[in-house]
Image (cartoon, coloured by chain):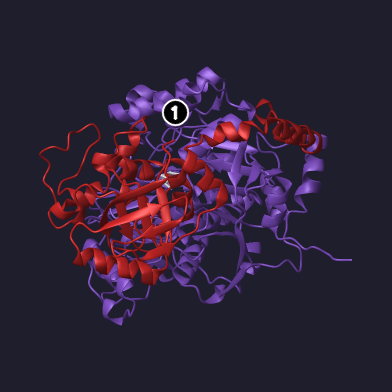
Amino acid sequence: MTMTTKTLYDKLWDAHIVKQRDDGSTLIYIDRHIIHEVTSPQAFEGLRLAGRQPWRIDSILATPDHNVPTTPKDRASGVEGIEDMVSKIQVKTLDENCDSFGITEFKINDRRQGIVHVIGPESGACLPGMTVVCGDSHTATNGALGALAHGIGTSEVEHVLATQCLVAKKMKNMLIKVDGKLGKGLTPKDVVLAIIAKIGTAGGTGYAIEFGGQVLRNMSMEGRMTVCNMAIEAGARAGMVAVDQTTIDYVKGRDFAPKGEQWDTAVASWRRLVSDENAVFDKVVEIDGSVIKPQVSWGTSPEMVVDIDGVIPDPVQEKDTVKKAGIERALEYMGLSAGQKITDIQLDRVFIGSCTNSRIEDMRAAASVVKGRQKAANVEEAIVVPGSGVVKAQAEAEGLDRIFIEAGLEWREPGCSMCLAMNADKLGAGEHCASTSNRNFEGRQGYGGRTHLVSPEMAAAAAIAGHFVDVREF
Amino acid sequence: MKSFTTHTGIVAPMDRANVDTDMIIPKQFLKSIKRSGFGKNCFDELRYLDEGQPDQSCEGRPLNTEFPLNFPRYQGASVLLTRENFGCGSSREHAPWALGDYGFRAIIAPSYADIFYNNSFKSGLLPIILDGSTVDQMFTEMYETEGYELTISLKNQQVVTPSGQTFAFETDEFRRHCLLNGLDDIGLTLQDADAIHAYEVKLKDQSPWLFDAFKR
Ligand code: SF4
């Protein structure tokens, strides 16, 4: 008898096959479809032009997040408060599409509104074992639940709206095992940045990554979301973590999670969502968690990361000519020079938020660092943007907003904000920003802006010090 | 969708690795609710010396004359030659839309980010994978020869250089079929509506909590 062992990804994939087609492609069923204002308008338009209807509206949850203003003043008047006409039209278009098709939407000032990848798990709309898609590359965040979650383009948004399926090809399996014990002050963000630094931004291309090992087992659900969130920065469309008691405890009692008898059946099925003991991975990467230090990105790609006690790399050391040119260009764009100490970089702005780090634990971690201290004078602005209205309310109930405000930071309304600067929150040209977001591409946080990716604790410490500091000694 | 069978066109360089989607089409232009009109802002931050705004005319904006796509010799280019991991970053399909709207029909690179690769096929843009040394060779030939053109046949899955050298590439059967015929893949999937319904019946039985969750 032959035993077939399966990885977590194999199990999720197999369970969602609608049809294996002769041409090698597979129709995969989609359980949950999350939509936002930026990547959905053209999909709805396509649907209308073809005279089609959404296949299953109860699978769809919508919210505006990318364009919404985050200052309480602008937010007070809802959609009408969006000053930028083009942004306003986009948010209105989402509302109209959802209203006309009867799709559940957390509108701009709904208490449950927030960044798509924050509200999915938080509301219980995304659950273990599901396939989850969204027209947004950080959808992998939901993989922390033991789900198969990934970003799709707008044509695929339309395809899922119309058919509840995706035409897909199976990816390869990769296991990233982080063992050992994380040092004090080290966070999931440092873990994922260290992973990307190791495997590179294309390291995971073509793979679904399962994150495992002792460090992941000990990590909270929100921490696992931070790690899975950045799978795409390592090139992988999907990242995931096996289900364990931490997962079940997290899901229990959430608004849209199953209840009563259904809950018990669901839990029983979710418990099987782990890779079999002898499951075969196409690639295994092992990382020693105990040697990870606080990470800071210095360049314009998420793999351009160094330890907090490190220095800016020297392109002369790089043999590969394409890579060398990349380093030189990044140094020029960032206004940095080889050999410079990371701790010497002076900061103009600090951004604590984004789907990577805007959950309640992130808020608590940042607050604990700034508590009783004052923002440095050279930091013009430090904004804290909770990931959802629910996170915001919880933080306020705990008094975290007061701690930030007293330390000289700004407490904002939920949204993507300065992560990609589609709303009014942006960097000025040449400004350096300590950011808890996920991308440091040229211009990402504002035209000519210079982003440094860090953990919430590191960003908070940088806001106080005015430059990067080792949060372990802060 | 626009079909792609064979195409001959001028090749232009984007001589860097890890070209990201924010570079291909900066976020301020994603506010549009249309699918077209992104071409004038493709590579906006590299092409112009000022910061572009949506709904702004690009006539008269200061051009970055050091950026190759602005060189006279690459005007009218329809094939983009580039390096590893092209299209990394966001899932925005606005990136292939912008490249297509600019006039590109095909891209040649040693590798692509997954989502970008997938999105390209959906919008009629052909992303071709050739190995690093072939790409190197093409860069050299392109820089040496003004008006360097490549002929691409999707049907035969090959790229032919001006000297007649032929390089084979691969695409998977389904995507090739759709692109060759300009097929709407939603229509194709709906031919399997029965299979989808049957799957749903089974799913409702096994995992009823997946349905009507928002009524809970
Ligand atoms: S927070 Fe940033 S990365 Fe996350 S969904 Fe919003 S824009 Fe994208």
Q: Nearer the viewer, residue A338 or A359?
A: A338
Q: Position of residue A54 (x, y in %)?
A: 58, 26
Q: Which chain is red?
A: B
Mark 1 neighbour class, 10 Å CA radius: few under 14, some 14 to 19, many 20 or more: many
Residue B137 picture location, percent across and down = 31, 70
A362 vs B34: above or below: below
Q: Which quadrant does the N terminus of chain A fall into?
A: bottom right
* Residue occupying the far right of the picture: A1
Circle 1 residue: A108
Q: Is residue B114 above or below residue B101?
A: below
Residue B86 shown left or right of residue A187 in the figure: left
Relative depth, front residue between A379 and A225:
A225
Residue visible at 36% across and 32% down in the picture:
A72
Q: Position of residue B202 (x, y in %)?
A: 79, 36
Ligand 1 positioned in quadrant: top left
Chain purple in the figure, letter: A
- Above or below residue A225? Residue A322 is below
Identify the subunit bearing mark 1. A
Where, by quadrant of the figure, is residue A21 drawn?
Answer: top right
Image coordinates of residue B193 in percent, x first then y, are: 68, 30
Residue type at tag 1 = Ile
Judged from this view, the residue extending furthest toward the top is A100
Circle 1: element type: loop
Residue A239 visible, this angle: yes
Tally the numbered discs. 1
Q: Nearer the viewer, residue B18 or A50?
A: A50
Left or right: residue B1 versus residue A344 is right
The answer to whether residue A392 is visible is: no
Q: Cβ of disc 1 within 8 Å of ligand 1?
A: no
Rendered image quadrant of residue B97:
top left
